[in-house]
Amino acid sequence: MANLHTHFAGISSPNPFWLASAPPTDKAVNVIRAFEAGWGGVVWKTLGEAGPAVVNVNGPRYGGLMSPDRRLTGFNNIELITDRDLEVNLREIKEVKRAWPDRAVVVSLMVPCNEEAWKAILPRVEDTGCDGIELNFGCPHGMSERGMGAAVGQVPEYIQMVTAWCKQYSKLPVIVKLTPNITDIRLPARAAKAGGADAISLINTINSIMGVDPYSLSMVPSTGGKGSHGGYCGPAVKPIALNMVAEIARDPATAGLPISGIGGISTWRDAFDFIALGAGNVQVCTAAMVYGFKIVQEMIDGLSNYMDEMGFTSIEDFRGRAIPTVSDWKYLNLNHITKAVIDQDKCIECGRCHIACEDTSHQAIMATKDGQRHFEVKEEECVGCNLCTLVCPVPECITLRNLAPGEVDLRTGKTVSAEHLDWTMHPNNPARAA
Ligand SMILES: Cc1cc2nc3c(=O)[nH]c(=O)nc-3n(C[C@H](O)[C@H](O)[C@H](O)COP(=O)(O)O)c2cc1C
Ligand code: SF4
Ligand code: SF4
């Protein structure tokens, strides 16, 4: 029987599903309802320093990218950190943790980038009895204009410096939340490790503009006719987040540093991808905002069923197992040959594969045969690019077949070799290895 219990950076939780720091974790009433629904932990909505709270816009703070069937595939926000009083937040965190000792309660923090500010807030947070802190070096809007959030997360030296202050002035586990708005995600991760971080979490939101109204010609969403770039998240960002998680997971410089995976997680399958690529747990924001707290039940049941099916008793049994399959392009086997195959019994003759291949790939799908409408792959043209399988509306109608060593590739006339040949050794590469 699968055991979903996790120990992430020394923090225990009954399952790997945490709510990310965002509106779902903004106040006790939400967090309690989330715990009742089954979430294993929360990262409380980011707290700022004592004093007057931040002020949010009173116009639309969210924007969406919709699929044709009106599913929210991308989500954009210009919300700031918590606009509630620090004292109220600290009191509620203390009460919630006391009432839910088995759940993880981590507090997200963002204060000015000076030692005194961090030194002042850390003991107050520790007093709540929370399990850890997450340093929000990610918000790409508003707070970054004030020298916080992504403005810190984009400078590895600052990340290391602030992380070290937190380790110096607090006994709590420190999770450093990274911004994706950077060229090489490995550099801030290495800086967090150098500063003594117990873990990293990623991704925070991606800088974005959602669009322009064609009649007013103003950016949308807008507040009084003007908009600001905001943070992008939701299902559309998951591949970007997965790549960043994998980059860090396979970087020898950060090997073993626990990773909390965030970005576009809506189902157990999404969570599985992050864990298989090295994440020790996951955090969710957009899916909870769109579908409500109860989505965690699908995540728990789905992951448990999968683990039972595979004979995995704990998350550690498959965590990171896919990392060795992530490679640089230059090491891919150029002797591996695939061809598309159309299942004639499933084909509804819509013609989409033909148009896609004809106009933009390798003219490898015929549209007629013996004067009749008929779709079939011409193996002598097919390069196995996968475009047709992606545009075909019928599941499993087009599949890719691997040619076995010894078979002849009709496109090149060459016999498929069993030997591995990648670009580093390829005869066309002037810089190939001797
Ligand atoms: C409305 C909104 C507010 C957010 N506020 C915070 C915040 O205060 N602190 C923080 O670290 N991340 C914040 N985030 C980022 C999320 O925690 C998360 O990193 C991001 O949304 C990606 O996850 P998702 O694709 O599951 O939404 C916010 C996201 C949204 C949508
Ligand atoms: S795999 Fe690519 S080249 Fe082959 S038939 Fe499909 S679209 Fe054409
Ligand atoms: S896209 Fe699929 S269903 Fe449509 S013609 Fe091609 S194989 Fe048939």
Image (cartoon, helix red, strand yellow):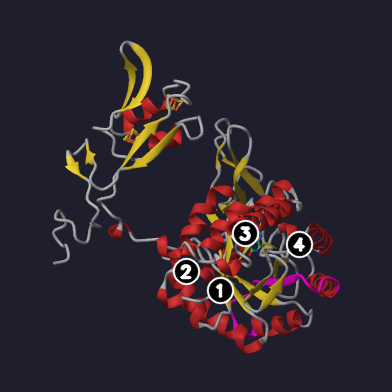
**Mark drawn on residue 307:** 3
Per the model, the C-alpha gap separating discs 2 and 1 is 9 Å
Per the model, the C-alpha gap separating discs 1 and 4 is 25 Å
Give the residue at x 41% y 60%.
325
Q: Few, some or many C-alpha atoms within 10 Å of disc 2 (few <14, some 14-19, many ≥20)?
A: many
Query: In which quadrant of the rendered view does residue 95 lie?
Result: bottom right
Q: Which label's residue is closer to the chain start, 2 or 4? A: 4
Above or below — where is 62 with respect to 358? below
Q: Which residue is situated farthest in the top direction here? A: 371
Name the residue that disc number 2 marks: 249
Task: Give the residue type that dot 2 points to.
Answer: Ala
Give percent across and percent down for residue 173: 64, 80
Name the residue that disc number 1 marks: 258
Q: Camera-side residue: 213 or 169?
A: 169
Mark 2: secondary structure:
helix
Name the residue that disc number 4 marks: 26
